[in-house]
Image: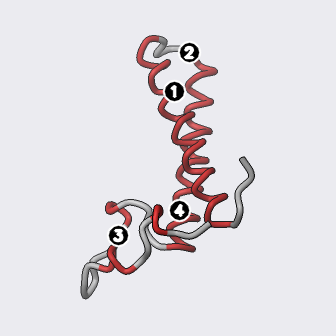
Amino acid sequence: MTPANNREALLWQVQMTSFAVDEARLYLDTHPCDATALAQYGQMRDMRLNAVNAYNAQYGPLTTDAATANNRWAWVDNPWPWEVEV
């Protein structure tokens, strides 16, 4: 898959790193002392956080926990990811 634009590329990065984090976490459930897996988990976790933060900064919150509620609930102001035309 080739991302069509920056928004799609960031979503793709979030999805890829989320998958890697989940897989590493599952592996670590049965191999908690594997130093290599722990390092890879930390690296993927950081990459995912960077991708999520980049998406949030450019396109608004990806999840409700990143939404701010200063004067109003602005979560609904941005298009939902499935509403974005590619």
Q: Amino acid at mark 2?
A: Asp
Residue under circle 2? Answer: 34
Circles 4 and 2, Cβ within 8 Å, touching? The answer is no
Q: Amino acid at mark 3?
A: Ala
**Which marked residue is nearer to the observer: mark 2 or mark 1?**
1
- Towards the viewer: 5 or 69: 5
Marks 2/1: CA–CA distance: 14 Å
In terms of sequence position, does the residue under pointer 3 or pointer 1 come before the other?
A: 1
Image location of residue 13, percent across then percent down: 62, 50
- Towards the viewer: 78 or 26: 78
- SS at mark 4 in the image: helix
Say above or below: 68 vs 35. Answer: below
Circles 2 and 1, Cβ within 8 Å, touching? The answer is no
**Which marked residue is nearer to the observer: mark 4 or mark 2?**
4
Say above or below: 11 vs 39. Answer: below
Residue under circle 1? Answer: 23
Identify the residue at horizontal 61%, vertical 29% (top origin): 39
Residue under circle 3? Answer: 67
Marks 3/1: CA–CA distance: 27 Å
In terms of sequence position, does the residue under pointer 4 or pointer 2 come before the other?
A: 2
Residue under circle 4? Answer: 53
Marks 4/1: CA–CA distance: 21 Å
Image location of residue 66, percent across then percent down: 38, 64
Q: Amino acid at mark 4?
A: Asn
- SS at mark 1 in the image: helix
In terms of sequence position, does the residue under pointer 3 or pointer 4 come before the other?
A: 4
Q: Quadrant of residue 62?
A: bottom left
